[in-house]
Amino acid sequence: SRPSVYHSARATFYSPSDPSGIGGMRFELIRAAPSWRNEGPRYDCVFVSTDSDTLGFEGLDVARVLLLFSFEFRNVVYPCALIHWFDKVDTQPDDLTGMWVVEKAYEVDGITRHTSIVHVDSIMRAAHLIPVYGQHQVDYYHSHHDTLDTFERFFVNKFIDHHANEVAF
């Protein structure tokens, strides 16, 4: 059968510190849409579990979802995501902000972005990235749709909500 393409997926996760909801179960939408609200594309960033034996951000990586799709093989459906990876800049969070810093991951040629296909079950939840702006002024005509393409390094915002704070420590 032909692959099916989706523009969003629902991430369901357990958040025991959340006083609302039944038993701490939460969900959020992860989007990979070429057109979002007639303004431009939206390709969300996510936490990907890469080492389930390690707690916190050390067991996670950050990626940008480019495509959500599924395919069937031998009567089993495989939901997948095409992603661009980010690499951790250091082995600990930034001293000043307390946030981890990541940068775009590239292949050996230094030009091609490191891209993979992962099972959607490895995606934990959405991640919020803040550009490391540096010393240069941001172009007046810069669009927020281009931020993840324009900048190379980003802070992983663990302060966006208490759920992110629980996983990105």
Image (spheres, grey):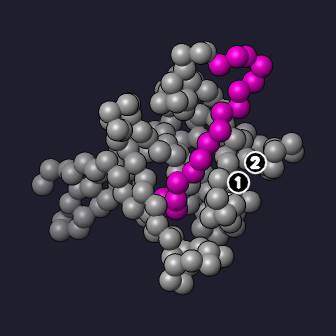
Q: Which residue lies furthest to the right in this view?
A: 95
Nearer the observer: mark 1 or 2; the answer is: 1
Tell me: 160 left or right of 117: right
Q: In this orientation, which residue lies closer to the viewer: 71 or 135?
A: 135
Residue 53, horizontal then vertical, whole percent: 64, 70
Tell me: 3 left or right of 169: left
- Is residue 145 something one can see in this rendering? yes
At 52% from the left and 46% from the top, the residue drawn is 45
Image-quadrant location for residue 34: top left
Check residue 8 for magenta coloring: no
Residue 166, horizontal then vertical, whole percent: 68, 66
Q: What residue type is labelled 2?
A: Met
At 65% from the left and 38% from the top, the residue drawn is 130
**Tag 2 residue:** 99
**Tag 1 residue:** 159
The N terminus lies in quadrant = bottom left
Work out whether 112 lies above or below 164. Answer: above
